[in-house]
Amino acid sequence: MIANVVQSLFGAAFDWPLGAAISVCILIITISLLFLSERLERRWSLK
Amino acid sequence: MYSRAYKTLVSLPPLVWVGLFLLLPYALMFAHSFWAIRDGVIVHQWNLLNYETLFSKPVYLEVLLRTMRIAASVTVCSLLLGYPLATTLVHAGARKELLYQLVIVPLWVSYLVRGYAWKTILGSEGVLNGFLQYLHLTHEPVAFLLYSPFAVVLMLTHIYTPFVFLPITRHSSTFLARLSKPRTTSAPVRFKHFLRVILPLSIPACSPAQLLPSFFRWRFSCTAPCWGASAP
């Protein structure tokens, strides 16, 4: 799981910047999915 | 009506809380992603090296895609379990409350405990392997049951099905109870009724926005120690 990679980067690997970059990407994907799902839900509810 | 001062006073603590413990850490994380590390020390030099590393090394994208695949599998499995469960519960009549509690009560137990409970079932000396050997279906413990993507999907489905079940129940109970059933007992007619009436009405409840926790499933980190160590 990607969260384990982030955990190891922030922990044992001590590569906070790369861990943060992965976290930002995950956050962007999550927000995009939420935005998309809301749009889809709105479209379904209109029908 | 409440005064402006009262509204400000009431809304200030949560706003400060969100700003301090949510927005500020996000901002710090965002800033860190543009900094570099040199000789074990974080250097505050703005660059895109980390993003370059992330997209140039296939291992990160591979793990990301695998995680998303697992999350999608868990979402589908939870939906397949949660939807019929919710529909059954709405029509359960007097036993409705009892069934509802049966789904809710396991949430009192920490997900880690529930995860470790699965370990005793799926482990090499677990209940399932013992049962399979007792039936002479296998002669040695089956290895793929634990520490595999299968185990991760199974356990996350178990943990998250109530979170899928709850919004569907809440939404479905508003219309399913009032909806008249087809008078015939013919299976094709009932199936048609389900496809044409019930399913379209319940789609908003099954939409990803309602199944919010499923999106966060793919960020799940606690699976590795107990269930998916060999499947990072």
Image: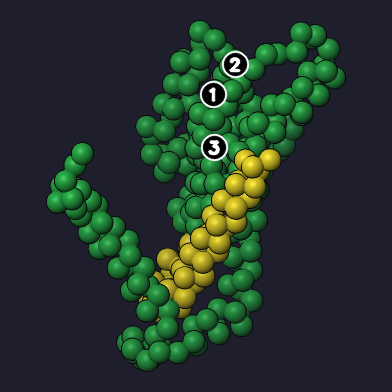
**Chain letter of disc 3?**
B
**Chain letter of disc 1?**
B
The residue sitting at 41% across, 43% down in the picture is: B112
Q: Amino acid at mark 3?
A: Val
- Residue B74 pos. (x, y %): 61, 45
- Residue B72 pos. (x, y %): 64, 51
**Pointer 1 and pointer 3: residues touching (CB < 8 Å)?**
no
Name the quadrant of the N terminus of chain B.
top left
- What color is chain A drawn in? yellow
Considering depth in this image, is B127 or B160 the residue closer to the camera?
Answer: B160
Mark 2, other Cα within 10 Å: few <14 / some 14–19 / many ≥20: few
Element at badge 3?
helix
Mark 2 or 3: in front is 2
Q: Amino acid at mark 2?
A: Arg
The residue sitting at 59% across, 65% down in the picture is: B64
Query: Which circle marks residue B164 in the picture?
Result: 3
Name the quadrant of the C terminus of chain B.
bottom right
Query: Which circle marks residue B178 in the picture?
Result: 2
The residue sitting at 49% across, 87% down in the picture is: B48
